[in-house]
């Protein structure tokens, strides 16, 4: 059973808005507004359409941008955390590690040392391909990695 | 005659709407518009690229059964179709020009590695990158 294409087109608009400004806060109410749906309806419809909850999708975009900034600039990591939407360096570092399996400084070192053949593929498309996959919640990923059975210690960015 | 790619098609939700967008807003020209029953063969071309046609097709009968057509409509609407790239001389100027008729931009012009790119969608959900050549 499928979803209404008209609804999907509007949900895509909310996804595009997150893509365009992933550093901003995207509470469900704001996303629902961008797609012309009710807040109650939005999260469920989004997940059904795109396979991940909206806040988790936003995390992948933020990490993708952070990775690009690590690779392409010499901005301090604190500044990158701030520019990509985190309020605390600690949360950024922890989430980054949980998603990519490595810490920002190590990723920067590795990425900047690797020569890239990027000329033949449009940069914008290459970036989308470099987006981390996030099939489970960051908190769940962390729990599994640590063998920890306790609940999440903090709310994910919404 | 010359050999090469002649037509590449994309799926759209409504051919009249797509025609208004690609011709009326993007400035493409109609190349072929022929109907045969419920089937309409509609292609447009870029004014500076006469040898290439972009087909604007709708999923549905007689080529697709109802379930397949529904799936294709969903894929298009959620932006799951392959990327499309439009080369322009001046990305920032094109961005300004296309904003006037209300093209839905998903990304404003950004310079990366000395190249400016932007992104927009057609009314159906197909995603285009606008790249400065």
Image (tube, rainbow, N blue to C red):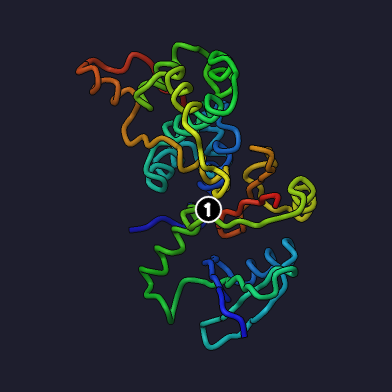
Quadrant position of residue B7: bottom right
Can residue A122 be seen here? Answer: yes
Circle 1 crowding by C-alpha within 10 Å: few under 14, some 14–19, many from 20: many
Which residue is the site of mark 1? Answer: A9
Task: Say if B71 sits above or below A49 in the image.
Answer: below
Task: Say if B39 sits above or below A51 in the image.
Answer: below
> Residue A82 at x, y = what percent?
57, 17
Mark 1: which secondary structure? Answer: helix
The mark total stands at: 1
Task: Say if A36 sits above or below A74 in the image.
Answer: below
Quadrant position of residue B69: bottom left
Q: Output the chain of dot 1.
A: A
- With A129 as the anchor, is B119 left or right in this view? right
Residue occupying the point 53% across, 18% down? A81
- With A90 as the anchor, is B18 left or right in this view? right
Residue occupying the point 56% across, 60% down? B124
> Residue A66 at x, y = what percent?
52, 26
> Residue A100 at x, y = what percent?
38, 27
Q: Which residue lies most toward the bottom here?
A: B36
- With A107 as the anchor, is B16 left or right in this view? right
Can residue A58 be seen here? Answer: no
Residue occupying the point 42% across, 79% down? B63
Residue occupying the point 55% across, 66% down? B12
Quarter that holds the N terminus of chain A: bottom left
Camera-side residue: A67 or A146? Answer: A67
């Amino acid at each position: 059973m499928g979803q209404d294409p008209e609804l999907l087109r509007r949900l895509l608009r909310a996804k595009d808005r997150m893509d365009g400004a992933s550093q901003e806060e995207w509470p469900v109410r704001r996303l629902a507004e961008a797609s012309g749906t009710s807040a109650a309806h939005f999260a469920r419809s989004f997940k059904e359409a795109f396979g991940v909850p909206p806040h988790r999708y936003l995390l992948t975009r933020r990490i993708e941008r952070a990775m690009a900034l690590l690779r392409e600039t010499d901005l301090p990591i604190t500044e990158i955390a701030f520019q990509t939407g985190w309020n605390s360096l600690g949360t950024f570092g922890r989430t980054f590690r949980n998603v990519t399996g490595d810490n920002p400084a190590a990723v920067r070192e590795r990425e900047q040392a690797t020569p890239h053949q990027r000329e033949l593929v449009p940069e914008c498309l290459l970036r989308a391909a470099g987006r981390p996959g996030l099939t489970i919640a960051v908190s769940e990923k962390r729990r599994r990695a640590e063998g920890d059975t306790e609940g999440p210690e903090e709310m994910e960015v919404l | 005659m010359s050999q090469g790619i002649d037509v590449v098609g994309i799926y759209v939700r409504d051919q009249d709407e797509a025609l208004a967008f690609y011709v009326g807003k993007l400035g493409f020209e109609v190349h072929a518009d022929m109907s045969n029953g419920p089937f309409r063969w509609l292609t447009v071309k870029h004014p500076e690229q006469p040898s290439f046609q972009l087909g604007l097709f709708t999923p549905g009968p007689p080529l697709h059964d109802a379930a397949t057509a529904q799936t294709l409509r969903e894929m298009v609407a959620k932006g799951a179709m392959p990327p499309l790239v439009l080369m322009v001389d001046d990305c920032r100027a094109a961005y300004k020009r296309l904003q006037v008729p209300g093209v839905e931009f998903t990304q404003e012009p950004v310079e990366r590695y000395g190249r400016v790119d932007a992104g927009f969608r057609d009314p159906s959900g197909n995603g285009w990158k606008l790249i400065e050549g």
